[in-house]
Image (cartoon, rainbow, N blue to C red):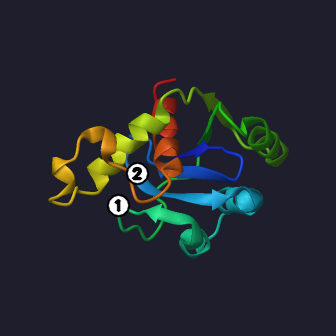
Amino acid sequence: MILGIDPGRDKIGWALISSNGDLFLSGICPISEQESFITTFIRDTDCWQHELSPWVTEKPQIIVALPEKLSLIAVGNGTGNQETMNLLKRLGVRTVIVDEKETTLEARELYWNFHRLSWWQRYLPRIMRFPHRPLDDLAALIIARRSLLL
């Protein structure tokens, strides 16, 4: 399993994917709760789903238990990267830095793949379609999937 992180100033987007790129969960976490969020994945616990629930935004699959252990954390190289990397080094987690160029644009397309347009939105030009929430978690999904190519 791979945890993708899109660090920012106020919040971090995160996505948990399988080793073949399938999304398990994704969400957005305030930067002030970053350490407790990351330690949820590091320690072995059966109540991880309950602990993550405040931060979950996308949950495409119903999973009872994580199918594999966390093997890698992929972190985007943009804003807030240094603080997140310092935290991960202190926790002794295996990490890789991934280029996050154009992940926001790709995340917008991914959002519309997950959430169907309403009938009237189909008539709007693509540039005028705005998602109803921040997309940091979907940017993290792209970062995690890019780490599979490294």
Q: Quadrant of residue 119?
A: bottom left
Q: Quadrant of residue 59?
A: bottom left
Q: Residue at point 43% right, 56% down?
A: 24
Residue at numbered disc 1: 60
Q: Residue 143 location, x and y as percent? A: 51, 36
Q: Are marks 1 and 2 in contact (CB under 8 Å)?
A: yes
Numbered disc 2: secondary structure: strand
The answer to whether residue 32 is left or right of residue 30 is right
Label 2 Cα neighbours within 10 Å, binned few <14 / some 14-19 / many ≥20 = many
Q: Residue 87 location, x and y as percent? A: 80, 46
Q: Amino acid at mark 2?
A: Leu
Q: Which is more N-terminal, label 2 or label 1? A: 2
Q: Residue 109 location, x and y as percent? A: 33, 41
Tell me the tag on residue 23.
2
Q: Amino acid at mark 1?
A: Pro
Q: CA distance from mark 1 to mark 2?
A: 7 Å
Q: Quadrant of residue 107?
A: top left
Taking depth in this image into account, of 105 and 19 the one nearest to the observer is 105
Q: Residue 92 location, x and y as percent? A: 79, 44
The answer to whether residue 3 is left or right of residue 82 is left
Q: Residue at point 60% right, 45% down?
A: 5
**For the view shown, which residue lies furthest in the right direction?**
90
